[in-house]
């Protein structure tokens, strides 16, 4: 799965500056600057791979002469102890770029792996598993790519590509109906063709949203019985209102929630709580 980011160079530059500082002292002390070698990148724990292009660019930033050969593509399921890439070049460069490259692979592959577990749980229901904006500051593009690698769907990239009316927006506007009206007026006046979704946390807010003509509704922090009741109410309304669940979703309950007849389930844990996969770089040949 191809990854393209206009911000990638800046992200990597920051990570390398943070790690290298004014020099990789151990490598400078131990390794001859003329020694070349080959190394394997090993995925030590099984899961879904993500981050090959990022790791490759890390090594290129350290030393443009390094040759990075991906052996497995992003989005692939890999078994434990699988070699996913080979890297060739000066050992000083390989060792200096090692940790930053592996950190990106670990983080992104962890997200892809957790996403794939959620997607697998809802197989056959037609429900899309969405991510959220609960991402690591500065790394959103990378983490949302990882979600795609795991079979998930990106909800929104930021505050600029969708309108999502939440509880604080409703309080600020004064009511559900007024918040929806203001957002529709804004879309019409500015010509910004973006989806409009409203979050509801009670049956009262749901009725207000339906009365106000909502076309996409997020059911927030409702249990299975409440979700089922809300979906039944929504489906009695003419039109194709899209329904999303958010809040309190786990691997243990995502299947029963999906079977309530919703369209989307958003899971913040995909990006804020995914455990990293374990990777290592091993020198296999020196010259």
Image (cartoon, rainbow, N blue to C red):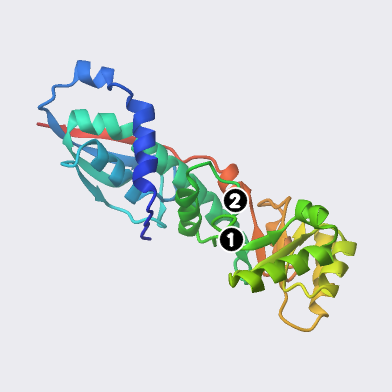
Q: Residue 117 versus residue 25: which sits nearer the camera?
A: 25
Name the N-terminal-most of marks 1 and 2: 2
Q: Inspect this view and state whether residue 262 appears.
A: no
Residue sitting at the far right: 204
Give SS at disc 2. Answer: loop
Residue for badge 1: 155
Other residues around mark 1 within 10 Å, as few (<14) / some (14–19) / many (≥20): some
- Against 237, residue 230 (above or below) is above
Q: Residue 169, image x and y in percent?
A: 76, 55
x 41%, y 37%: residue: 103
Alpha carbon separation for disc pair 1 and 2: 8 Å
Residue at the location (21% across, 32% down)? 93
> Which corner quadrant of the image does residue 264 belong to?
bottom right
Which quarter shows the N terminus?
bottom left
Give me the residue at 40% from left, 43% from top.
Answer: 105
Disc 1, SS: loop
Vertical order, 23 against 184 (above or below): above
Disc sitting over residue 35 in the figure: none
Looking at the image, the residue that sits furthest to the bottom is: 238
**Disc marking residue 133:** 2
- Mark 1 in CB contact with mark 2 (< 8 angstroms): yes
């Amino acid at each position: 799965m191809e990854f393209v980011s206009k911000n990638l160079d800046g992200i990597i530059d920051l990570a390398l500056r943070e790690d290298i500082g004014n020099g990789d002292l151990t490598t400078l002390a131990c390794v001859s600057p003329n020694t070349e070698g080959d190394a394997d990148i090993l995925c030590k724990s099984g899961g879904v791979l993500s981050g090959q292009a990022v790791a490759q660019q890390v090594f290129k930033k350290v030393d443009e002469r390094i040759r990075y050969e991906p052996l497995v593509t992003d989005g692939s399921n890999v078994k434990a102890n699988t070699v996913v890439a080979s890297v060739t070049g000066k050992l000083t460069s390989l060792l200096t770029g090692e940790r930053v490259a592996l950190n990106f692979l670990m983080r992104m592959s962890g997200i892809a792996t957790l996403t794939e577990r959620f997607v697998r749980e809802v197989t056959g229901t037609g429900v899309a598993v969405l991510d959220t904006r609960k991402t690591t500051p500065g790394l959103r593009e990378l983490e949302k790519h990882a979600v795609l690698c795991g079979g998930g769907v990106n909800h929104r990239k930021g505050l600029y590509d969708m309108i999502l009316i939440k509880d604080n927006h409703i309080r600020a506007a004064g009511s559900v109906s007024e918040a929806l009206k203001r957002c529709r007026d804004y879309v019409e006046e500015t010509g910004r063709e973006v989806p409009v979704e409203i979050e509801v946390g009670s049956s009262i807010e749901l009725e207000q949203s339906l009365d106000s003509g909502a076309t996409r509704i997020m059911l927030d922090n409702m249990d299975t019985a409440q979700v089922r009741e809300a979906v039944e109410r929504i489906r009695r309304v003419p039109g194709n209102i899209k329904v999303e669940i958010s809040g309190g979703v786990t691997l243990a309950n995502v299947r029963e929630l999906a079977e309530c007849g919703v369209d989307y389930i958003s899971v913040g844990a995909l990006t804020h709580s995914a455990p990293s996969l374990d990777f290592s770089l091993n020198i296999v040949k020196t010259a």
